[in-house]
Amino acid sequence: MIEQNDIRNAYTLSADFYRNEKLFELVRENIFARSWQFMTDSSRLKAPGHAVPITILDGFLSEPILLARDSVDQLHCLSNVCTHRGNLLTEGECHVGTLRCRYHGRRFNLDGTMHSAPGFEGATNFPAASDNLPKVPLEQWKTMLFANACASDQLFPFKELVADMDERLGWLPLEKFLFDSTGAREYLVKANWALYCENYLEGMHIPYVHPDLATALDIKDYRSEVYKYANLQIGIASGAQECFHLPPSSPDFGDRIGGYYYWLFPNMMFNFYPWGLSINVVQPLGQELTKVVFLPYVWDESKRALGAGAALDRVEREDEEIVERVQQGVKSRFYKRGRYAPRWEKGVKHFHELLKQYVPEIE
Ligand code: FES
Ligand SMILES: [Fe+2]
């Protein structure tokens, strides 16, 4: 008997998902507002006294937070909203002893505790714990920092998000990967964020949409693995194309891997190539508008233009163009939903199942 969630008889999401504003909002609150989001890497906060304000998913969650390294070298993630009347506290990256609010001069230590509050002489029960900056959950995988906009009810423990990536690629010296700010890119895509993720989650379109990339990969050996909150696609390098020199401890030792494509629920892609790592974050802006951020971390610059990790900008534009066409298509009165190609679309199905798990209203 075929199980109900067997990919061979399963259907993709109803097209309603890409049109329904109510579902878009449910996804924002039930999923994104409780999800782990990539912030930056720890080298951005090397020395005590450094503070970096970041807005979690600007234009969608728009949650202002602050990363800070205090005088005893502890890293903190805090709300960047002054506990007095709600002014945004830190305006730009800075190096300070205390954080001072520009509105009425309240000061905070870099661990978030209130330092001083001019004008509050005589106030009773002051300062209380609620006058300190709220702590924002912060987690780290190697050098990479992740925050969660939800203080106490996260979707799942962070460890479960990165466990499989760590087990497989823990041998990579991420501390030697340097962020290349000049190579960072932002793309505005006129499509629903989930369509962009779905496209990423299958290699089936590579020969059709990315003719150049298709020559760097041996597409018949392309494979994918599904984990609890992440999945992995493995691209095998074709012919003499650049590949990883894997250590004997790697489960893939002996294979010619051109790229490891990790997707972390709900919207992050960690793409490892012989030259380094391209982190892509898919940021919803509206039902039909998405910003995609590409953040390159370079390990070996000499391999940057080789193999499956080359010409990422071109590959992105090819993806963007097809995804924008799909956005038009899923609005058609005739399109209802589709089926999954069993050999290729396990990752897409996994994504859809997680969406439904957290938003049961999705069909
Ligand atoms: S809002 Fe910050 S001191 Fe008043
Ligand atoms: Fe693609």
Image (cartoon, rainbow, N blue to C red):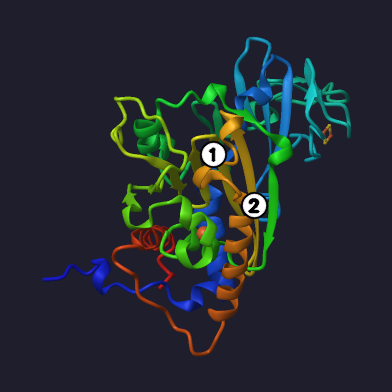
State which quadrant residue 86 falls in: top right
Amino acid carrying label 2: it is Asp
Query: Residue 269: x percent and y percent?
Result: 51, 47
Residue at image point 51% right, 44% down: 307
Q: State ligand 1's quadrant.
A: top right
Q: Specify the quadrant that holds the N terminus.
A: bottom left
Amino acid carrying label 1: it is Ala
Residue at image point 60% right, 49% down: 312
Of residue 353 and residue 187, the one placed in the foreground of this image is: 187
- The answer to whether 123 appears left or right of 321 in the picture is right
Q: Closer to us: mark 1 or mark 2?
A: 2
* Vertical comparison of 334 with 312: above or below: below
Judged from the image, the secondary structure of the residue bearing numbered disc 2 is helix
Query: Residue 38: x percent and y percent?
Result: 57, 40
Identify residue for label 2. 313
Of residue 107 and residue 99, the one placed in the foreground of this image is: 99
Question: Total label count?
Answer: 2
Q: Is residue 266 visible?
A: yes
How far apart in space, not on screen, are marks 1 and 2 (Cα)? Answer: 36 Å
* Vertical comparison of 221 with 121: above or below: below
Q: Earlier in the sequence, mark 1 or mark 2?
A: 1
State which quadrant residue 300 falls in: top right
- The answer to whether 295 appears left or right of 96 in the picture is left
Is the C-beta of the residue carrying label 2 under 8 Å from the nearest atom of ligand 2?
Answer: no
- Residue farthest toward the top in the current orientation of the protein: 72
Identify residue for label 1. 151
Of residue 60 and residue 79, the one placed in the foreground of this image is: 60
Residue at image point 33% right, 69% down: 341
